[in-house]
Image (spheres, rainbow, N blue to C red):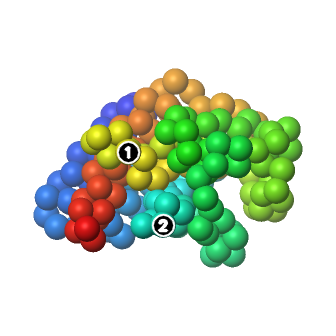
Amino acid sequence: MKAELARRAAERAQLMLQEGASREDVLPLLIDAAEQVAGEDAVCSILMLDKDGLLRNAASPGLPADYLLAIDRLKPDAHVGTCAAAAATGAMVVTCDFRADDKWAELRHLPLALGFVGAWSMPIKAADGTVLGTLGTYFRTQRSPSAEEVKSVEVLASAAGLVLERDKERVA
């Protein structure tokens, strides 16, 4: 069921792109699907790399503005958080417990203050494999994503890659 939900959302996103919809219209659709896939009061976020190679908010409707401001312009770094690490490595990064993961040493107070205890992040890539951003999921319980969640979010991240790649081409 989760895979079907993700597939339908990705197809809808592609249709919206073909119709000329903006990034601001398409990415929230993918975030909504990712949150439905994760369940359990999860909150998802899409960060994109800007022209300077820093992570910026692209779609994070469930996160407060002060949190987004605090993480704005993070540099991809394999040793920081989940999204910065996923952006740096181009691989999925999972943190089951912020308190037990050294990658969160300087930032853990931010998600903990919102009631989140763990997160995972999937890199969003262009067709050529270049990392364009990340799709992160925050959890209020200690857990790892299920195999079905991973496969579903891979589909959603691929659709987000089409959106971010299109916008990158428009700017270039």
Residue type at mark 2: give it: Asp
Task: Look at the numbered discs 1 and 2 and tell me whether their residues touch, using CB distance below 8 Å.
Answer: no
Front in this rendered view, residue 165 or 98: 165
Percent x, y of residue 31: 45, 55
The residue tagged 1 is: 130
Judge the density around disc 1: few (<14), some (14-19), many (≥20) Cα neighbours within 10 Å: some
> Residue 92's quadrant in the figure?
top right
Task: Identify the residue shown where x is 56% and y is 45%.
Answer: 88
Horizontally, is 133 left or right of 88 in the view?
A: left
Horizontally, is 49 left or right of 23 in the view?
A: right
Task: Identify the residue shown where x is 13% and y is 64%.
Answer: 19
Task: Identify the residue shown where x is 85% and y is 38%.
Answer: 100
Residue that extends furthest to the top in the rendered view of this protein: 147
Horizontally, is 76 left or right of 140 in the view?
A: left
**Can residue 35 be seen?**
no
Percent x, y of residue 164: 33, 58
Dot 1: element:
loop
Question: Which quadrant, please, contains the C terminus?
Answer: bottom left
Residue that extends furthest to the front in the rendered view of this protein: 52
Q: Is residue 137 above or below residue 48?
A: above
> Residue 153's quadrant in the figure?
top left
**Can residue 80 be seen?**
yes
Residue type at mark 1: give it: Thr
Residue that extends furthest to the left in the rendered view of this protein: 19
Dot 2: element:
loop
Percent x, y of residue 30: 39, 53
Q: Is residue 120 above or below residue 26?
A: above
The residue tagged 2 is: 52
The numbered mark, 1 or 2, whose residue comes first in the sequence reads 2
Percent x, y of residue 154: 41, 36
Horizontally, is 145 left or right of 17 in the view?
A: right
